[in-house]
Image (tube, rainbow, N blue to C red):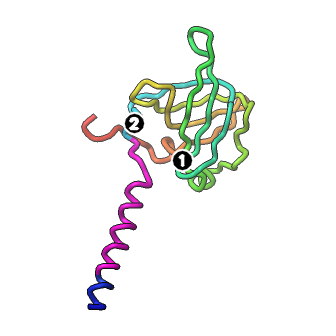
Amino acid sequence: MRLVHRGAFAVFTLCSLLATGAAAHHSTAEFDYSKQVTIKGKVKEVQWTNPHSYIQLLVDGEDGKQVQWSVEIGSPSININMGWKKNSVKPGDEVTMLLSPARSGKPYGTLRVLTFPDGRELKGVAAQVGARPAPGR
């Protein structure tokens, strides 16, 4: 009987770990990697968080009103491995971003390259892994 309980506990534990791992990450299919968009604006906020970090960028829209773009830049650990520091980009910085936009058309995307006015660049995960469109797209 004791062996049955241990086996059941082991199966339960394994299933719990697998379920957690599967729910911990989302697909990147929400981005259109066949398109590249360049936006320029002022950094409103940097969210250095797991599992993904974001930069909120205020961009002048066609109608003269500011549009807030949310740009995914990858996890802190990946960013650090790519040369980023937590304070590489700060609120108030003027930057240009090359990104792959959301398929939904919303002001959202994943970063390929961030460029400062002095020409310094920081690469995003989409540039690092050579992201390609999802199969069948």
The residue at the point 38 percent across, 45 percent down is 27
Q: Label 1: which residue?
A: 52
Q: Which mark is residue 75?
A: none
> In front here: 34 or 71?
71
Q: Which residues are magenta?
A: 8-28
In this picture, residue 39 sits left or right of residue 106: right
Kind of residue at disc 2: Glu
* Residue 37, position as x, y percentages in the image: 50, 25
> In front here: 43 or 119?
43
Q: Name the N-terminal-most of marks 2 and 1.
A: 2
The residue at the point 28 percent across, 90 percent down is 3
The residue at the point 53 percent across, 51 percent down is 51
* Residue 100, position as x, y percentages in the image: 47, 32
Secondary structure under the numbered disc 2 in the rendered image: loop
In reply to whether residue 81 is colored magenta, the answer given is no
In this picture, residue 78 sits left or right of residue 23: right
In which quadrant will I find the C terminus?
A: top left
* Residue 24, position as x, y percentages in the image: 44, 55
Q: Is residue 48 above or below residue 1?
A: above
In which quadrant will I find the N terminus?
A: bottom left
The residue at the point 70 percent across, 39 percent down is 89
Q: Is residue 112 above or below residue 80?
A: above
Considering the whole magenta stretch, tell me its main secondary structure.
Answer: helix
Quarter location, residue 38: top right
Q: Alpha carbon of mark 2 to alpha carbon of mark 1: how far?
A: 14 Å
In this picture, residue 18 sits left or right of residue 37: left
Q: Label 2: which residue?
A: 30
In reply to whether residue 18 is colored magenta, the answer given is yes
Quarter location, residue 88: top right
* Residue 29, position as x, y percentages in the image: 37, 39
Secondary structure under the numbered disc 1 in the rendered image: loop
